[in-house]
Image: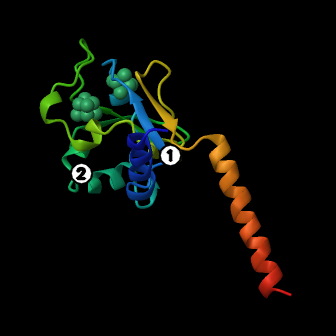
C-alpha cells in the first residue's frame, strides 16, 4: 500500500471515524431525492407533527414533502427536484447533506443505495484486516483473564 493510501486510511478511520469510502460519481437520476427518510435524535420520523418542529432547525427540511409512510417511517420527496429533467433546481446552492450524499449512515437507518446509483460505499478495511483485529483483541482479553481473573 502506498504512503498516500495509508495516510488516507488513517485520516478516514481515525480522524473522521469512517468505515467506508465513497467511490463513483452521481449519474443525476434523482432517485435519492425522492425516497427520503428523516432521522433525528429519537430515530426515523414517524409523525408529521415531529417533522413540523424539525423544519425550524434546517432549511433542508423545508424542501421536503410527505409522500407516504412505510415500515421504516415517513417517506419524503424533495420539492426542488425537477420532475421532468430529474435534476436539482437549486444544484449550486443545495445543502451540505445533499453534497455529501451518500454517507455510510444510510446503512444504520436500514437504507441502501439504489441499484442504479453511480456511487458505491466500499469498506475501508478488508475482511482479513477486521478478522485479524478481532483475533488480536481476543488474545489480549485471554491474557488479561489469565493475569487478573484467577
Ligand atoms: S435539494 Fe436538490 S439535491 Fe437536495 S434533495 Fe432536494 S433535489 Fe435533491
Ligand atoms: S441515486 Fe445516486 S446517481 Fe441518482 S441522483 Fe442520487 S446520488 Fe446521483
Q: Is residue 86 visible?
A: yes
Q: For this rendering, which residue is in front, 150 or 50?
A: 150
In the image, residue 51 lies at what x, y percent?
Answer: 33, 51
Which residue in the structure is indicated by mark 2? 55
Q: Relative to 19, is 59 on the left or the right?
A: left
Indicate the secondary structure of the residue bearing disc 1. loop
- Give the quadrant of ligand 1: top left
- What residue is drawn where x is 23% and y is 43%? 96
In the image, residue 148 lies at what x, y percent?
Answer: 78, 87
Which residue in the structure is indicated by mark 1? 109
Instruction: Choose top left, top right, bottom left or bottom right for residue 42.
Output: bottom left
- Give the colour scheme shown: rainbow
- What residue is drawn where x is 60% and y is 40%? 126
Q: Relative to 126, is 138 on the left or the right?
A: right
94 over 57 or under it: above or below: above
Q: Residues within 10 Å of mark 2 (few under 14, many from 20)?
A: some
Q: Relative to 51, is 134 on the left or the right?
A: right
Amino acid at each position: 500500500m502506498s504512503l498516500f493510501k495509508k495516510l488516507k486510511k488513517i485520516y478516514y478511520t481515525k480522524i473522521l471515524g469512517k468505515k467506508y469510502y465513497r467511490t463513483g460519481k452521481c449519474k443525476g437520476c434523482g432517485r435519492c431525492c425522492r425516497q427520503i427518510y428523516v432521522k433525528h435524535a429519537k430515530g426515523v420520523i414517524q409523525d408529521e407533527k415531529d417533522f413540523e418542529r424539525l423544519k425550524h432547525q434546517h432549511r433542508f427540511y423545508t424542501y421536503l414533502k410527505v409522500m407516504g409512510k412505510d415500515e421504516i417511517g415517513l417517506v419524503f420527496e424533495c420539492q426542488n427536484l425537477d420532475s421532468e429533467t430529474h435534476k436539482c433546481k437549486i444544484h449550486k446552492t443545495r445543502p451540505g447533506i445533499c453534497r455529501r450524499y451518500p454517507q455510510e449512515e444510510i446503512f444504520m437507518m436500514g437504507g441502501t443505495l439504489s441499484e442504479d446509483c453511480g456511487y458505491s460505499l466500499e469498506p475501508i478495511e478488508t475482511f482479513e484486516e477486521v478478522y485479524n483485529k478481532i483475533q488480536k483483541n481476543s488474545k489480549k482479553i485471554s491474557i488479561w483473564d489469565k493475569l487478573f481473573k484467577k
